[in-house]
Amino acid sequence: MKFVDEATIDVAAGHGGAGCASFRREKFIPFGGPDGGDGGRGGSIRAVADRNLNTLIDYRYARRHTARNGESGRGSDQYGAAGDDILLRMPVGTIITDLDTGQVIAELIDPEQPVMLCKGGDGGFGNLHYKSSTNRAPRQKTPGWPGEQKKLKLELRVLADVGLLGMPNAGKSTLIAAISNARPKIADYPFTTLHPNLGVVRVAPEQSFVVADVPGLIEGASEGAGLGHRFLRHLQRTRLLLHVVDLAPFDDAVDPVKDARAIVAELKKYDPALHAKPRWLVLNKIDMIPAEERDARVKDFVRRLRWKGPVFQISALAREGLQPLVRSAYEHVAQFQRQAAEPDPRFASDAEAGDG
């Protein structure tokens, strides 16, 4: 299935039904009084996050969503029926923006929590609504109120704990296939990955995290070169970035240090906040380097790159050095989760003061 992470849709809520001006007329009942009912409410449109969806492909082809109008009121005290609501199911992580105002309407993070997109119009009042002791034969009625209409932009940012980035053919797809349940396309040519891949990494029976692999970046990606710039947004929610570097390129003219610096520069140009995220260096394909030369090659790379952060030496193909990397990544993610679960000490102190 084609991966779609952007779509534009038009949504229109239903109009409210008109009120009715009617009078009760039955044999032997003179002056029956008003009996015109109110109009029904128009249908509303809501969105909800669904864990079973991972793409916006449905909204690429179904771009118009219109709710039903409310029915008009009738005589004999009959109120009009309300229009049916529409519930749009979208992947978790979808950001919904009003194209006309640029305002973010909703960010679908919690599954099964509906968010109002367009509110249906209220129904009009029938003359039964205006009956009083001083106005016994009202002839007033009102039309229904119009429903809201909006043009919306849908943007999907996948929810992953760890993101993989690097040059094409750095081995990211092989790595995610080796450590998770993802099965991306793997081949010996550049740009094999054409869309993000998500995988769940099982560290222990009750310990896991989600890893995302995006298409490879090249120099000039922030200006639109290559494919990776289109999917960098999917790394903005991650808590950790793993910078995968091919330490043994086939072409001797390729300098891994230069490629690594180019990736870092593109991150900074695209989004300074993404560049500031915790980032670890993962040196891949060490199985292609003779064992006696590995340490010297790694030290030379780190020295030339002037890298100060964590460094992991792996071979995704041979599955060497993966366990320390996976365990460390899980501990990093779990630390963020524990910090998020801890109560704010400011509110805790207020609660203690109230108890006292």
Image (spheres, helix red, strand yellow):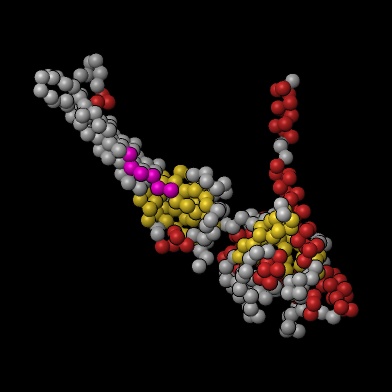
Location of residue 132 in the rendering, given as x and y in whole percent from the top left corner = 25, 18
Residue 25 visible? The answer is: yes
Residue at x 76%, y 71% (from the top left corner): 319
Which residue is at the far front? 205
Residue at x 71%, y 52% (from the top left corner): 206
Q: How many marks?
A: 0
Which portion, as a residue range, is magenta? 82-87
Establish if 129 lies above or below 236: above
Residue 143 visible? The answer is: no
The reply to whether the magenta stretch includes residue 121 is no
- In the displayed structure image, the side of residue 142 where residue 275 appears, left or right: right
Which residue is at the far top? 133
Residue at x 41%, y 53% (from the top left corner): 151
Establish if 194 lies above or below 8: below
Which residue is at the far left? 27
Question: Is 249 in front, or is 35?
Answer: 35
Location of residue 246 in the rendering, given as x and y in whole percent from the top left corner = 74, 74
Prevailing secondary structure of the magenta residues: loop
Location of residue 105 in the rendering, given as x and y in whole percent from the top left corner = 50, 47
Question: Is 325 in front, or is 297?
Answer: 325
The reply to whether the magenta stretch includes residue 86 is yes
Q: Which quadrant of the view contains residue 34?
A: top left
Location of residue 40 in the rendering, given as x and y in whole percent from the top left corner = 30, 37
- In the displayed structure image, the side of residue 342 where residue 62 appears, left or right: left
Establish if 62 lies above or below 227: above
